[in-house]
Amino acid sequence: MLTTPPLTLYVHLPWCVRKCPYCDFNSHQARGELPFDAYVDALLADLDHDLPLAWGRPVHAVFFGGGTPSLFPPAAIDRFLQGASARLRFMPGLEITLETNPGTAEHGRFADYLAAGVNRLSFGIQSFDDGCLQRLGRIHDSAQAETAVKQARDAGFDNFNLDLMYALPGQDLAMAEHDVERAVALEPAHISHYQLTLEPNTLFAARPPAGIPDDDRAWDMQERCQALLADAGYEHYEVSAYARPGRQCAHNLNYWRYGDYLGIGAGAHGKLTLGAEQAIVRRWKPRHPTAWLSVAGTDAGIGGEERVQPAQRPFEYMLNVLRLEEGFRLEDFEARCGLDRDAIAGPLAEARRRGWLREHDGRILTTALGGRFVNDVMELFLPEDTAPRRMPA
Ligand SMILES: C[S@@+](CC[C@H](N)C(=O)[O-])C[C@H]1O[C@@H](n2cnc3c(N)ncnc32)[C@H](O)[C@@H]1O
Ligand code: SF4
Protein backbone atom coordinates (compact mmCIF):
# COMPACT_ATOMS: atom_id res chain seq x y z
CA MET A 1 0.00 0.00 0.00
CA LEU A 2 1.48 3.36 -1.08
CA THR A 3 1.48 5.96 1.70
CA THR A 4 2.27 9.63 1.07
CA PRO A 5 5.79 10.51 2.24
CA PRO A 6 6.95 13.99 3.37
CA LEU A 7 6.75 16.71 0.72
CA THR A 8 9.34 19.39 -0.12
CA LEU A 9 9.43 22.20 -2.70
CA TYR A 10 12.23 22.61 -5.25
CA VAL A 11 12.51 25.94 -7.08
CA HIS A 12 14.83 26.21 -10.08
CA LEU A 13 16.48 29.57 -10.84
CA PRO A 14 18.35 28.98 -14.09
CA TRP A 15 20.84 31.82 -14.70
CA CYS A 16 24.56 32.14 -13.94
CA VAL A 17 27.09 34.93 -14.51
CA ARG A 18 29.03 32.55 -16.73
CA LYS A 19 28.62 28.89 -17.64
CA CYS A 20 31.32 26.73 -16.02
CA PRO A 21 32.97 24.34 -18.50
CA TYR A 22 32.28 21.20 -16.39
CA CYS A 23 28.61 21.91 -15.59
CA ASP A 24 25.64 20.12 -17.17
CA PHE A 25 22.98 21.62 -14.90
CA ASN A 26 20.12 23.51 -16.54
CA SER A 27 22.01 26.80 -16.20
CA HIS A 28 22.31 29.60 -18.72
CA GLN A 29 24.67 32.52 -18.96
CA ALA A 30 22.83 35.73 -18.09
CA ARG A 31 22.79 38.25 -20.93
CA GLY A 32 21.61 41.74 -20.04
CA GLU A 33 19.01 42.48 -17.38
CA LEU A 34 17.34 39.38 -15.98
CA PRO A 35 13.50 39.35 -15.76
CA PHE A 36 13.35 38.71 -12.01
CA ASP A 37 9.79 39.98 -11.53
CA ALA A 38 8.40 38.08 -14.49
CA TYR A 39 10.21 34.94 -13.31
CA VAL A 40 8.69 35.16 -9.82
CA ASP A 41 5.21 35.70 -11.32
CA ALA A 42 5.76 32.65 -13.51
CA LEU A 43 6.97 30.57 -10.53
CA LEU A 44 3.78 31.34 -8.63
CA ALA A 45 1.66 30.52 -11.69
CA ASP A 46 3.61 27.25 -12.10
CA LEU A 47 3.00 26.46 -8.43
CA ASP A 48 -0.74 27.21 -8.79
CA HIS A 49 -0.89 24.78 -11.68
CA ASP A 50 0.84 22.01 -9.69
CA LEU A 51 -1.15 22.55 -6.46
CA PRO A 52 -3.81 19.89 -7.19
CA LEU A 53 -1.00 17.30 -6.95
CA ALA A 54 -0.33 18.29 -3.34
CA TRP A 55 -3.59 19.62 -1.85
CA GLY A 56 -3.41 20.11 1.90
CA ARG A 57 -0.03 18.43 2.39
CA PRO A 58 2.49 20.18 4.66
CA VAL A 59 5.79 21.28 3.11
CA HIS A 60 8.87 20.19 5.06
CA ALA A 61 11.61 22.13 3.23
CA VAL A 62 12.21 24.54 0.36
CA PHE A 63 15.31 24.44 -1.86
CA PHE A 64 16.27 27.19 -4.34
CA GLY A 65 18.67 25.49 -6.75
CA GLY A 66 20.29 26.54 -9.95
CA GLY A 67 21.87 27.97 -11.85
CA THR A 68 22.80 30.64 -9.39
CA PRO A 69 19.83 31.55 -7.17
CA SER A 70 21.94 34.22 -5.44
CA LEU A 71 21.67 36.28 -8.65
CA PHE A 72 18.06 36.92 -7.62
CA PRO A 73 17.66 39.98 -5.37
CA PRO A 74 16.36 39.26 -1.86
CA ALA A 75 13.14 41.17 -2.64
CA ALA A 76 12.34 38.66 -5.41
CA ILE A 77 13.00 35.69 -3.10
CA ASP A 78 10.87 37.37 -0.42
CA ARG A 79 7.95 37.89 -2.83
CA PHE A 80 8.13 34.28 -3.97
CA LEU A 81 8.22 32.92 -0.40
CA GLN A 82 5.28 35.05 0.63
CA GLY A 83 3.29 33.84 -2.36
CA ALA A 84 4.28 30.21 -1.81
CA SER A 85 3.47 30.24 1.91
CA ALA A 86 0.01 31.67 1.08
CA ARG A 87 -0.61 28.70 -1.23
CA LEU A 88 1.04 25.85 0.68
CA ARG A 89 1.15 24.82 4.33
CA PHE A 90 4.76 25.51 5.38
CA MET A 91 5.78 23.50 8.48
CA PRO A 92 6.89 25.81 11.30
CA GLY A 93 10.65 26.41 11.14
CA LEU A 94 11.06 24.55 7.84
CA GLU A 95 14.52 24.60 6.25
CA ILE A 96 14.79 27.05 3.31
CA THR A 97 18.06 26.71 1.37
CA LEU A 98 19.42 29.06 -1.30
CA GLU A 99 22.37 28.07 -3.52
CA THR A 100 24.95 30.83 -3.67
CA ASN A 101 27.91 31.50 -5.91
CA PRO A 102 30.52 33.39 -3.85
CA GLY A 103 31.16 35.59 -6.90
CA THR A 104 27.66 37.07 -6.57
CA ALA A 105 27.80 37.90 -2.86
CA GLU A 106 27.11 41.61 -2.61
CA HIS A 107 27.56 43.19 0.75
CA GLY A 108 24.29 43.39 2.68
CA ARG A 109 22.45 40.78 0.62
CA PHE A 110 22.74 38.00 3.17
CA ALA A 111 20.88 39.86 5.92
CA ASP A 112 18.05 40.49 3.44
CA TYR A 113 17.86 36.83 2.38
CA LEU A 114 17.64 35.90 6.06
CA ALA A 115 14.86 38.47 6.58
CA ALA A 116 13.03 36.95 3.58
CA GLY A 117 12.97 33.57 5.36
CA VAL A 118 16.02 31.81 3.87
CA ASN A 119 17.73 30.03 6.79
CA ARG A 120 20.36 27.91 5.01
CA LEU A 121 22.90 28.83 2.32
CA SER A 122 24.79 26.46 0.06
CA PHE A 123 28.00 27.97 -1.34
CA GLY A 124 29.59 26.72 -4.55
CA ILE A 125 33.21 26.90 -3.38
CA GLN A 126 34.69 23.99 -5.42
CA SER A 127 38.29 24.60 -4.25
CA PHE A 128 40.37 27.07 -2.26
CA ASP A 129 43.26 26.79 -4.73
CA ASP A 130 43.27 29.78 -7.08
CA GLY A 131 44.94 27.78 -9.87
CA CYS A 132 42.24 25.10 -9.65
CA LEU A 133 39.49 27.74 -9.56
CA GLN A 134 40.89 29.32 -12.71
CA ARG A 135 41.12 26.00 -14.51
CA LEU A 136 37.47 25.36 -13.53
CA GLY A 137 36.49 28.71 -15.05
CA ARG A 138 35.08 30.00 -11.76
CA ILE A 139 34.19 33.69 -11.43
CA HIS A 140 35.67 34.03 -7.93
CA ASP A 141 38.99 33.39 -6.17
CA SER A 142 39.52 31.73 -2.80
CA ALA A 143 39.71 35.03 -0.88
CA GLN A 144 36.30 36.08 -2.24
CA ALA A 145 34.88 32.69 -1.28
CA GLU A 146 36.13 33.01 2.31
CA THR A 147 34.86 36.60 2.56
CA ALA A 148 31.41 35.60 1.30
CA VAL A 149 31.10 32.82 3.87
CA LYS A 150 32.22 35.11 6.69
CA GLN A 151 29.78 37.83 5.59
CA ALA A 152 26.95 35.29 5.64
CA ARG A 153 27.89 34.20 9.14
CA ASP A 154 28.13 37.82 10.32
CA ALA A 155 24.68 38.41 8.86
CA GLY A 156 23.31 35.64 11.12
CA PHE A 157 23.45 32.44 9.02
CA ASP A 158 24.53 29.55 11.25
CA ASN A 159 23.44 26.82 8.84
CA PHE A 160 25.42 26.67 5.63
CA ASN A 161 26.90 24.14 3.24
CA LEU A 162 30.12 24.38 1.26
CA ASP A 163 30.33 22.51 -2.07
CA LEU A 164 33.82 21.19 -2.84
CA MET A 165 34.92 19.18 -5.84
CA TYR A 166 37.96 16.88 -5.95
CA ALA A 167 39.95 15.04 -8.63
CA LEU A 168 40.40 18.42 -10.30
CA PRO A 169 42.82 19.13 -13.15
CA GLY A 170 46.30 19.62 -11.68
CA GLN A 171 45.22 18.58 -8.15
CA ASP A 172 47.22 16.14 -6.02
CA LEU A 173 46.29 14.42 -2.75
CA ALA A 174 47.81 17.14 -0.55
CA MET A 175 45.87 19.84 -2.43
CA ALA A 176 42.60 17.94 -2.05
CA GLU A 177 43.25 17.54 1.68
CA HIS A 178 44.13 21.21 2.01
CA ASP A 179 40.78 22.17 0.41
CA VAL A 180 38.93 20.14 3.02
CA GLU A 181 40.99 21.67 5.84
CA ARG A 182 40.20 25.20 4.65
CA ALA A 183 36.52 24.33 4.35
CA VAL A 184 36.43 22.85 7.87
CA ALA A 185 38.15 25.98 9.25
CA LEU A 186 35.06 27.99 8.18
CA GLU A 187 32.94 25.74 10.45
CA PRO A 188 30.10 24.95 8.04
CA ALA A 189 27.22 22.73 9.24
CA HIS A 190 27.50 20.68 6.04
CA ILE A 191 30.07 19.89 3.35
CA SER A 192 29.32 18.34 -0.05
CA HIS A 193 32.38 16.70 -1.56
CA TYR A 194 31.88 15.76 -5.21
CA GLN A 195 34.26 13.98 -7.53
CA LEU A 196 34.56 16.05 -10.72
CA THR A 197 32.81 14.14 -13.48
CA LEU A 198 33.11 14.82 -17.20
CA GLU A 199 29.48 15.22 -18.17
CA PRO A 200 28.41 14.75 -21.80
CA ASN A 201 27.69 18.00 -23.64
CA THR A 202 30.08 20.11 -21.56
CA LEU A 203 33.25 21.84 -22.70
CA PHE A 204 35.31 19.59 -20.42
CA ALA A 205 33.86 16.46 -22.05
CA ALA A 206 34.63 17.81 -25.52
CA ARG A 207 38.18 18.82 -24.59
CA PRO A 208 39.17 17.23 -21.28
CA PRO A 209 41.69 19.40 -19.43
CA ALA A 210 45.15 17.98 -18.74
CA GLY A 211 46.05 16.56 -15.36
CA ILE A 212 42.77 15.00 -14.18
CA PRO A 213 43.70 12.41 -11.53
CA ASP A 214 42.93 8.79 -12.49
CA ASP A 215 40.33 6.69 -10.64
CA ASP A 216 42.79 5.22 -8.14
CA ARG A 217 44.12 8.64 -7.18
CA ALA A 218 40.56 9.97 -6.99
CA TRP A 219 39.66 7.08 -4.67
CA ASP A 220 42.65 7.92 -2.42
CA MET A 221 41.46 11.53 -2.26
CA GLN A 222 37.95 10.46 -1.37
CA GLU A 223 39.13 8.14 1.41
CA ARG A 224 41.61 10.59 2.88
CA CYS A 225 39.18 13.53 2.78
CA GLN A 226 36.44 11.40 4.31
CA ALA A 227 38.78 10.59 7.20
CA LEU A 228 39.62 14.28 7.67
CA LEU A 229 35.92 15.15 7.69
CA ALA A 230 35.16 12.39 10.20
CA ASP A 231 37.93 13.68 12.50
CA ALA A 232 36.37 17.14 12.28
CA GLY A 233 32.94 15.80 13.34
CA TYR A 234 31.20 15.53 9.96
CA GLU A 235 29.13 12.37 9.51
CA HIS A 236 29.18 10.84 6.06
CA TYR A 237 25.45 10.33 5.37
CA GLU A 238 25.27 10.16 1.57
CA VAL A 239 27.78 9.30 -1.18
CA SER A 240 28.95 12.95 -1.43
CA ALA A 241 27.41 14.59 1.66
CA TYR A 242 28.78 15.16 5.15
CA ALA A 243 27.00 16.91 8.02
CA ARG A 244 27.37 17.83 11.64
CA PRO A 245 24.85 15.82 13.71
CA GLY A 246 21.30 16.86 12.82
CA ARG A 247 22.42 19.17 10.00
CA GLN A 248 21.72 16.99 6.96
CA CYS A 249 20.07 18.88 4.09
CA ALA A 250 16.33 18.39 4.70
CA HIS A 251 15.26 18.65 1.04
CA ASN A 252 17.99 16.37 -0.29
CA LEU A 253 17.51 13.81 2.48
CA ASN A 254 13.80 13.62 1.68
CA TYR A 255 14.65 13.19 -2.01
CA TRP A 256 17.10 10.36 -1.29
CA ARG A 257 14.55 8.66 0.95
CA TYR A 258 12.23 8.57 -2.08
CA GLY A 259 10.09 11.32 -0.60
CA ASP A 260 7.90 13.64 -2.65
CA TYR A 261 8.74 17.07 -4.06
CA LEU A 262 7.05 19.69 -6.17
CA GLY A 263 9.46 21.03 -8.80
CA ILE A 264 8.77 24.48 -10.22
CA GLY A 265 10.75 26.72 -12.55
CA ALA A 266 12.51 26.08 -15.85
CA GLY A 267 13.41 22.40 -16.25
CA ALA A 268 12.38 21.48 -12.69
CA HIS A 269 11.31 17.91 -11.94
CA GLY A 270 8.70 16.86 -9.38
CA LYS A 271 7.67 13.51 -7.92
CA LEU A 272 4.32 13.11 -6.20
CA THR A 273 2.58 10.15 -4.60
CA LEU A 274 -1.19 10.15 -5.12
CA GLY A 275 -2.51 8.01 -2.26
CA ALA A 276 -6.11 7.77 -3.48
CA GLU A 277 -5.00 6.58 -6.91
CA GLN A 278 -2.12 4.47 -5.58
CA ALA A 279 0.08 6.19 -8.19
CA ILE A 280 3.47 7.89 -8.32
CA VAL A 281 3.61 10.76 -10.83
CA ARG A 282 6.71 12.43 -12.25
CA ARG A 283 6.23 15.82 -13.88
CA TRP A 284 8.82 18.09 -15.45
CA LYS A 285 8.89 21.56 -16.97
CA PRO A 286 10.34 22.94 -20.24
CA ARG A 287 14.08 23.43 -19.81
CA HIS A 288 14.81 26.69 -21.52
CA PRO A 289 14.05 29.75 -19.34
CA THR A 290 12.49 31.79 -22.16
CA ALA A 291 10.36 28.87 -23.34
CA TRP A 292 9.27 28.08 -19.79
CA LEU A 293 8.48 31.75 -19.02
CA SER A 294 6.05 31.97 -21.91
CA VAL A 295 4.00 28.90 -20.86
CA ALA A 296 4.42 28.59 -17.06
CA GLY A 297 1.12 28.01 -15.30
CA THR A 298 -0.68 26.67 -18.39
CA ASP A 299 -1.07 23.10 -19.61
CA ALA A 300 1.75 23.81 -22.08
CA GLY A 301 3.95 24.56 -19.05
CA ILE A 302 4.08 20.82 -18.31
CA GLY A 303 7.07 19.60 -20.30
CA GLY A 304 6.16 15.99 -19.61
CA GLU A 305 4.49 13.69 -17.14
CA GLU A 306 4.62 9.99 -16.46
CA ARG A 307 3.36 7.49 -13.95
CA VAL A 308 6.05 5.36 -12.40
CA GLN A 309 4.91 1.81 -13.05
CA PRO A 310 5.21 -0.71 -10.19
CA ALA A 311 7.92 -2.63 -12.08
CA GLN A 312 10.10 0.50 -12.28
CA ARG A 313 9.80 1.44 -8.62
CA PRO A 314 12.37 -0.92 -7.01
CA PHE A 315 15.17 0.44 -9.24
CA GLU A 316 14.11 4.07 -8.70
CA TYR A 317 13.95 3.46 -4.97
CA MET A 318 17.41 1.86 -4.84
CA LEU A 319 18.88 4.61 -7.04
CA ASN A 320 18.12 6.94 -4.16
CA VAL A 321 18.23 5.08 -0.85
CA LEU A 322 21.41 3.15 -1.62
CA ARG A 323 23.20 6.51 -1.76
CA LEU A 324 22.43 6.88 1.95
CA GLU A 325 24.64 5.46 4.70
CA GLU A 326 21.45 4.75 6.70
CA GLY A 327 20.19 2.41 3.95
CA PHE A 328 16.52 1.48 4.22
CA ARG A 329 13.99 -0.70 6.04
CA LEU A 330 11.85 -3.18 4.13
CA GLU A 331 8.71 -1.56 5.57
CA ASP A 332 9.85 1.80 4.11
CA PHE A 333 10.32 0.14 0.74
CA GLU A 334 6.77 -1.25 0.94
CA ALA A 335 5.23 2.10 1.96
CA ARG A 336 7.12 4.23 -0.58
CA CYS A 337 6.80 1.85 -3.52
CA GLY A 338 3.41 0.29 -2.80
CA LEU A 339 4.92 -3.17 -3.31
CA ASP A 340 5.40 -6.23 -1.17
CA ARG A 341 8.97 -6.94 -0.01
CA ASP A 342 8.83 -10.16 -2.06
CA ALA A 343 9.19 -7.94 -5.15
CA ILE A 344 12.89 -7.43 -4.33
CA ALA A 345 13.68 -10.73 -2.57
CA GLY A 346 15.64 -12.08 -5.56
CA PRO A 347 17.98 -9.12 -6.24
CA LEU A 348 18.39 -8.55 -2.50
CA ALA A 349 19.56 -12.11 -1.97
CA GLU A 350 21.93 -11.76 -4.93
CA ALA A 351 23.37 -8.48 -3.59
CA ARG A 352 23.98 -10.14 -0.22
CA ARG A 353 25.56 -13.17 -1.85
CA ARG A 354 28.01 -10.86 -3.63
CA GLY A 355 28.83 -9.08 -0.36
CA TRP A 356 27.36 -5.76 -1.55
CA LEU A 357 24.50 -5.40 0.95
CA ARG A 358 24.13 -6.44 4.58
CA GLU A 359 21.46 -6.21 7.25
CA HIS A 360 21.96 -4.45 10.56
CA ASP A 361 19.33 -3.56 13.17
CA GLY A 362 16.46 -4.11 10.76
CA ARG A 363 18.05 -1.94 8.05
CA ILE A 364 19.55 -2.95 4.71
CA LEU A 365 22.90 -1.21 4.20
CA THR A 366 25.65 -1.21 1.60
CA THR A 367 28.91 -2.88 2.62
CA ALA A 368 32.24 -1.13 1.96
CA LEU A 369 32.48 -3.15 -1.28
CA GLY A 370 28.89 -2.30 -2.25
CA GLY A 371 29.58 1.38 -1.56
CA ARG A 372 32.47 1.34 -3.98
CA PHE A 373 30.39 -0.27 -6.73
CA VAL A 374 27.06 1.25 -5.84
CA ASN A 375 25.93 1.57 -9.49
CA ASP A 376 26.33 -2.18 -9.94
CA VAL A 377 24.29 -2.80 -6.80
CA MET A 378 21.50 -0.54 -8.09
CA GLU A 379 21.46 -2.29 -11.47
CA LEU A 380 20.49 -5.56 -9.83
CA PHE A 381 17.08 -3.97 -9.16
CA LEU A 382 16.35 -3.01 -12.78
CA PRO A 383 13.11 -4.53 -14.14
CA GLU A 384 13.95 -7.88 -15.67
CA ASP A 385 13.28 -6.91 -19.28
CA THR A 386 15.66 -3.91 -19.07
CA ALA A 387 18.44 -5.47 -16.98
CA PRO A 388 21.70 -5.62 -18.92
CA ARG A 389 22.96 -9.17 -19.39
CA ARG A 390 25.58 -9.73 -16.75
CA MET A 391 28.28 -12.31 -16.40
CA PRO A 392 28.03 -14.27 -13.15
CA ALA A 393 30.26 -12.56 -10.52
C1 LIG B 1 24.06 24.45 -8.88
S1 LIG B 1 25.73 24.33 -8.40
C2 LIG B 1 25.90 25.32 -6.90
C3 LIG B 1 25.66 26.84 -6.89
C4 LIG B 1 26.32 27.70 -7.92
N1 LIG B 1 25.75 27.44 -9.19
C5 LIG B 1 27.82 27.57 -7.98
O1 LIG B 1 28.29 26.78 -8.78
O2 LIG B 1 28.48 28.27 -7.23
C6 LIG B 1 25.78 22.70 -7.69
C7 LIG B 1 27.11 22.05 -7.39
O3 LIG B 1 27.27 20.88 -8.20
C8 LIG B 1 28.64 20.55 -8.29
N2 LIG B 1 28.95 20.18 -9.67
C9 LIG B 1 28.52 20.78 -10.80
N3 LIG B 1 29.01 20.14 -11.89
C10 LIG B 1 29.77 19.11 -11.44
C11 LIG B 1 30.54 18.08 -12.08
N4 LIG B 1 30.64 18.00 -13.40
N5 LIG B 1 31.17 17.17 -11.29
C12 LIG B 1 31.06 17.24 -9.96
N6 LIG B 1 30.34 18.19 -9.30
C13 LIG B 1 29.71 19.11 -10.04
C14 LIG B 1 29.42 21.79 -7.86
O4 LIG B 1 30.09 21.53 -6.64
C15 LIG B 1 28.35 22.85 -7.67
O5 LIG B 1 28.63 23.72 -6.61
S1 SF4 C 1 27.87 28.63 -11.44
FE1 SF4 C 1 27.08 26.60 -10.71
S2 SF4 C 1 25.23 26.14 -11.93
FE2 SF4 C 1 26.30 27.89 -12.89
S3 SF4 C 1 27.48 26.94 -14.51
FE3 SF4 C 1 28.83 27.09 -12.70
S4 SF4 C 1 28.55 25.13 -11.52
FE4 SF4 C 1 26.89 25.29 -13.06
Image (spheres, grey):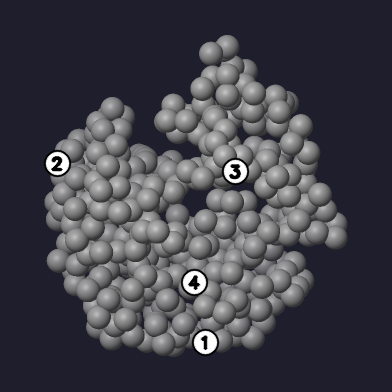
Task: Say if 261 sits above or below 32 in the image.
Answer: above
* Residue occupying the far top of the picture: 392
SS state under label 4: strand
Which numbered tag is attached to residue 79? 1
Of marks 2 and 4, which one's residue comes earlier in the chain?
4
Residue at which label 4 appears:
95
Distance CA(mark 1)–CA(mark 3): 38 Å
Of marks 2 and 3, which one's residue comes earlier in the chain?
2
Distance CA(mark 2)–CA(mark 4): 35 Å
Mark 1 CB lies closer than 8 A to ligand 1? no
Is residue 242 in sight in this rendering? yes
**Around disc 4, counting alpha carbons within 10 Å, would you say few (fewer than 14), some (14 to 19), or many (20 or more)?**
many
Dot 2 and dot 4 residues touching (CB under 8 Å): no
Nearer the observer, disc 2 or disc 4? Answer: 4
Task: List x then y, in percent, for residue 62.
Answer: 53, 70
Which numbered tag is attached to residue 328? 3
**Around disc 3, counting alpha carbons within 10 Å, would you say few (fewer than 14), some (14 to 19), or many (20 or more)?**
many
For residue 273, what is the image quadrant? Answer: bottom right
Task: Say if 345 sits above or below 69 in the image.
Answer: above
Task: Say if 334 sits above or below 287 in the image.
Answer: above
Nearer the observer, disc 1 or disc 2? Answer: 2
Please name the amino acid that badge 2 sits on.
Ala
Nearer the observer, disc 2 or disc 3? Answer: 3
Foreground: 69 or 205? 69
**Around disc 2, counting alpha carbons within 10 Å, would you say few (fewer than 14), some (14 to 19), or many (20 or more)?**
few
Distance CA(mark 1)–CA(mark 4): 17 Å
Please name the amino acid that badge 1 sits on.
Arg
Please name the amino acid that badge 3 sits on.
Phe
Nearer the observer, disc 1 or disc 3? Answer: 3
Residue at which label 2 appears:
174
